[in-house]
Amino acid sequence: MKLMIRKDRKGILSAYVTKKNLDEPIVCIAQAQMWSGLITLAIGWRFQLPEMAADTTLPVTVEAWRVAGGHD
């Protein structure tokens, strides 16, 4: 799924799921480096992010893989 990951003025990360027209805060990042790791959205959906450079600027649209969690 395509996700647009961005950070607001307060520094809160969120993900916009384009196919679902869904914008949710990222509530958990499984490792210190977000890229190539798992993230969890507020509704419980978990995504595996692609490997990217640590200094990747936001906002960015990526192809992520939904792992588990939440309901459609």
Image (spheres, rainbow, N blue to C red):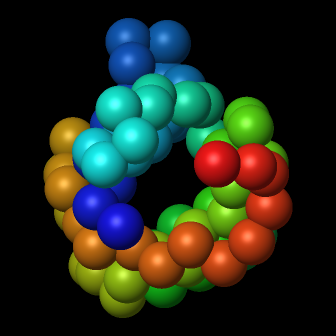
Dividing the image into 4 quarters, which one contains the N terminus? bottom left
- Which residue extends farthest top? 9
Q: In this view, does 71 lie to the left or right of 63?
A: right
**What residue is rendered at 28% in x and 45% in y?**
18
Residue 8 visible (yes or no) = yes
**What residue is rendered at 56% in x and 72% in y?**
66
Question: Residue 49: where, in percent of width, then height?
Answer: 46, 75
Answer above or below: position of 60 versus 46. Answer: above
Quarter where residue 63 is shown: bottom left
Question: Residue 58: where, in percent of width, then height?
Answer: 23, 44
Q: How many labels does the image show?
A: 0
Answer above or below: position of 2 versus 10. Answer: below
Question: Residue 65: where, in percent of width, then height?
Answer: 48, 78
**What residue is rendered at 20% in x and 56% in y?**
61
State the residue in front, 14 or 32.
Answer: 14
Q: Is residue 10 left or right of residue 9?
A: right
Quarter where residue 26 is shown: top right
Answer above or below: position of 70 versus 38. Answer: above
**What residue is rendered at 36% in x and 87% in y?**
51
State the residue in front, 3 or 53.
Answer: 3
Answer above or below: position of 37 versus 59. Answer: below
- Which residue extends farthest front? 72
Residue 54 visible (yes or no) = no
State the residue in front, 66 or 62.
Answer: 66
Question: Residue 48: where, in percent of width, then height?
Answer: 55, 78
